[in-house]
Image (cartoon, rainbow, N blue to C red):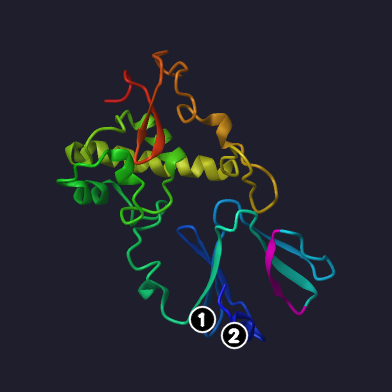
Amino acid sequence: VPDQLEQRLSGLQISGVDRRAKYLLLRTEPGTLIIHLGMSGSLRIVDDTLSPGKHDHLDLVFDNSKVLRFCDPRRFGSVLWSEEPLEQHALFKHLGPEPLTAAFDGHRLYLLSRNKKQPVKTFVMDNKVVVGVGNIYANEALFEAGIDPRRMAGKISLRRYLLLAEIIKEVLSRAIEQGGTTLKDFVGGDGKPGYFQQQLKVYGRGGESCPVCDTTLKAVRLGQRNTVYCPSCQR
């Protein structure tokens, strides 16, 4: 948290709230407050009479007696201030497009993947390629697309990338509708857990039967992340 943040924010009005990748953006006339929730951070609107708890690190106090409170038990989060255009900011200038926009499609995946020897799973999880495709959703999308996550990204055809891009959009849309995926302590903005984990077909199911063909699902490590796939359905 910047040392002079209180002085910089005092008296300002928030004109807009946006998101880019995992960063929450609170826009004001002179600049943007950039918030990253880390692994388990959360923002809550509370009354200014409620005393901060052990893991509450920052209060944004408004003139209506409400407080936007940042709680971060693991202390992996951050709060930054920027007065430069965000597209020029070091955190954002190399980021790929948002996955649910028209800027992300199979043609982009195909063009960026040429001559890439890395596994396709780590390729689609690269924030320079596309943001927001985390480990859980990469597992699920590759399964539904029938693509082996271990395959070299540069060896996959345009036809298969066109399919994969559409399935990534579908998987993420379904997850959003279900409030996300709660495996441990994640909750949404309403304080409720996400229910997409009930629809997971492969993630976390290594050693169990494939929901399509009953083949035993295999679990491997790719890019230091747990990866589950069906050796029969995914090629």
Start and end of the magenta stretch? 55-63
Q: Residue at x 42, y 81 (%)?
A: 84
Residue situated furthest top in the rendering: 214
Q: Main secondary structure of the magenta part?
A: strand
Label 1 is placed on what type of residue? Gly
Q: Is residue 181 left or right of residue 62?
A: left
Q: Residue at x 33, y 39 (%)?
A: 121
Is residue 59 in the magenta section?
yes
List x then y, in percent, for residue 63. 76, 80
Q: Nearer the viewer, residue 52 or 189?
A: 52
The reply to whether callout 2 and callout 1 are in contact (CB within 8 Å) is yes
Q: Quadrant of the C terminus?
A: top left
Q: Which mark is residue 31?
A: 1
Question: What distance separates the C-alpha of mark 2 from that of mark 1?
Answer: 9 Å
Image-quadrant location for residue 62: bottom right
Residue situated furthest left in the rendering: 115
Q: Nearer the viewer, residue 52 or 99?
A: 52
Vertical side of 216 occupied by 122: above or below? below
Q: Quadrant of the N terminus?
A: bottom right
Label 2 is placed on what type of residue? Arg
Read off the residue under disc 2: 8
User: Mark 2, residues whose alpha carbon is within 10 Å: few (<14), some, or many (≥20)?
Assistant: few
Q: Residue at x 17, y 37 (%)?
A: 155
| Tally of marks | 2
| Dot 2 or dot 1, earlier in sequence | 2
Q: Residue at x 58, y 30 (%)?
A: 198
Vertical side of 115 occupied by 71: above or below? below
Vertical side of 14 occupied by 143: above or below? above
